[in-house]
Image (spheres, coloured by chain):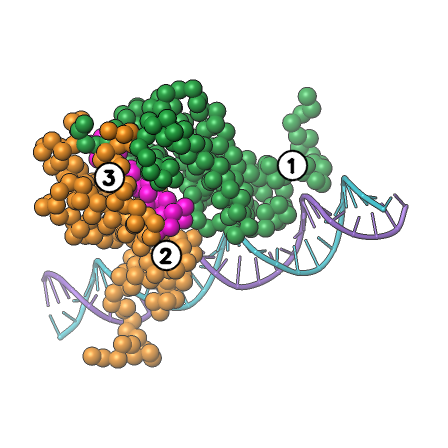
Chain colours: A orange, B green, C cyan, D purple
Amino acid sequence: MPASRPAESRPYHHGDLRSTLLAGAERTLREKGTGALSLRELAREAGVSHAAPGRHFKDKQALLDALALVGYDRLGQALSAADDPALPLERRLTVLARAYLAFSIDNAELLELMYARKHEPDASEQMAAAVDRTVGSLERVIADAQERGEIVAGDPQHLTLLTGATLQGIASFAAGGMLAPEAALDGIEEFVHLLLHGLKPR
Amino acid sequence: MPASRPAESRPYHHGDLRSTLLAGAERTLREKGTGALSLRELAREAGVSHAAPGRHFKDKQALLDALALVGYDRLGQALSAADDPALPLERRLTVLARAYLAFSIDNAELLELMYARKHEPDASEQMAAAVDRTVGSLERVIADAQERGEIVAGDPQHLTLLTGATLQGIASFAAGGMLAPEAALDGIEEFVHLLLHGLKPR
DNA sequence: TCAACAATGCTGTCAATGACAACAATGATG
DNA sequence: CATCATTGTTGTCATTGACAGCATTGTTGA
């Protein structure tokens, strides 16, 4: 394979600047947080001029939007990889919850971006679709269980919302440092149990 | 009362710049979001020079930290005003939940700031204390109920965590636009019921 | 083959910003 | 009232996002 880069005289065209920028952005995000993200800095890291990113992202916001979409893709993959319809309900939910929690711990800043509500209208549509896909996988689990009578009757959307909110809340606590990541992962089984069986004694 | 401001020749000293800046910051936050916050713009609005804010807030971050503390105060007041220990458990929780939800809808950006995890170490201590106070009020409700046998046994901190996480999740959905504010407020009763009684049929 | 043309990079420039330094006015204290 | 801390002020800097205008490369069709 050719030397990774000919140091002197790189080709005029980078070849894959868009991906490089996204990758760099995610690394920066992970290492220094959203606020530290600078288009010019990314350009420097990629070895291109300060205006080059503008060809691929009209805006800083456009880059952030693209990054958020990457996040939704990855989350979607993680969730569908983790879901096993063969498992009994409580176990199935626990596994899903653990996957979501793990993702949100590993990708805290990315998740923040995904949930940010300042996307440009154009990107917002794709974003909404991505959210639907993600929430959908949970809704399917709930609906399945409901058909089998393993879950109380009621609008499955409401039940999904509650379940999702609980997960999101725990994830948000873990990401915010109010709850140690290991503690969150360790407690997940108990949380799912409580969610299914309720806080009131039976 | 004296003309609100003598337009020409304001006194050299503003008199209450710190509060003015905080108030202005919160207004900007509410109207244009966190990202649009500029120290210089705030200075302009307050009618002082661009460097004046530096006397009160070493940093932009310092201002944000102070703002977050304001938020915790306000949230604490809202919660303790709403809590009524005389109510039966489910009702009591519902009322508390509604108060939290209302606050988080009315103060979405502020809440985001409060949960941000980039506070300067100094402010972090006060922040942690504020969080404890807030969580504490919920923990008391749970502990009370537990003593009366109205809630399953188990570490009250875990139960509080789950309850808080659920609330936080719903609030986060509402703030993020995935759930219409009215829908969230309307559904709160059902959510609390589900939380107490569990998703499984009894 | 080669003449448009689109895509992608580059340099230059601008206004806005946060941070800091040096200095000025005011107010409080002994 | 002399001294000193507080709080403002002006001036300056490097960084940044955005844009305009130009340059290089790749593609496409006559």
Residue displayed at 33% across by 43% down:
A170
Q: The residue marked by circle 3 belongs to what chain?
A: A
Label 2: which secondary element: helix
Q: Is mark 1 on a helix, strand or loop?
A: loop
Camera sees residue A48: no
The local crowd at label 3, few if under 14, some if 14 to 19, many if 20 or more residues have their Cα within 10 Å, is: some
The chain ID associated with circle 1 is B
Badges 1 and 2: C-beta atoms under 8 Å apart? no
Q: In this view, does A2 lie above or below B48?
A: below
Helix, strand or loop status at disc 3: helix
Q: Foreground residue, A28 or B100?
A: B100
Please tell me if label 1 and label 2 are on a single chain.
no
Q: What stretch is highlighted in magenta?
A: A157-181
Residue A168, horizontal then vertical, whole percent: 30, 42
Tell me where residue D5 appears, x and y as whole percent: 73, 49
| Disc on res. A29 | 2
Identify the amino acid type marked 3: His
Q: Quadrant of the N terminus of chain A?
A: bottom left
Asked whether residue A106 appears in the rendered view, the answer is: yes
The quarter of the picture where the C terminus of chain A appears is top left
> In the picture, residue B165 is in which quadrant?
top left
The residue at which mark 3 appears reads as A193
Amino acid type of the residue tagged 1 in the rendering: Asp
Residue A36, numbered circle = none
Pointer 1 residue:
B16
Q: Categorize mark 2 by other alpha carbons within 10 Å: few (<14), some (14-19), many (20+).
A: some
Q: Nearer the viewer, mark 2 or mark 3?
A: 3
Q: Is residue A176 magenta?
A: yes
Q: Which chain carries label 2?
A: A
Location of residue A65 with respect to A132 vertically, above or below: below
Do discs 2 and 3 share a chain?
yes
The kind of secondary structure the magenta stretch mainly shows is helix
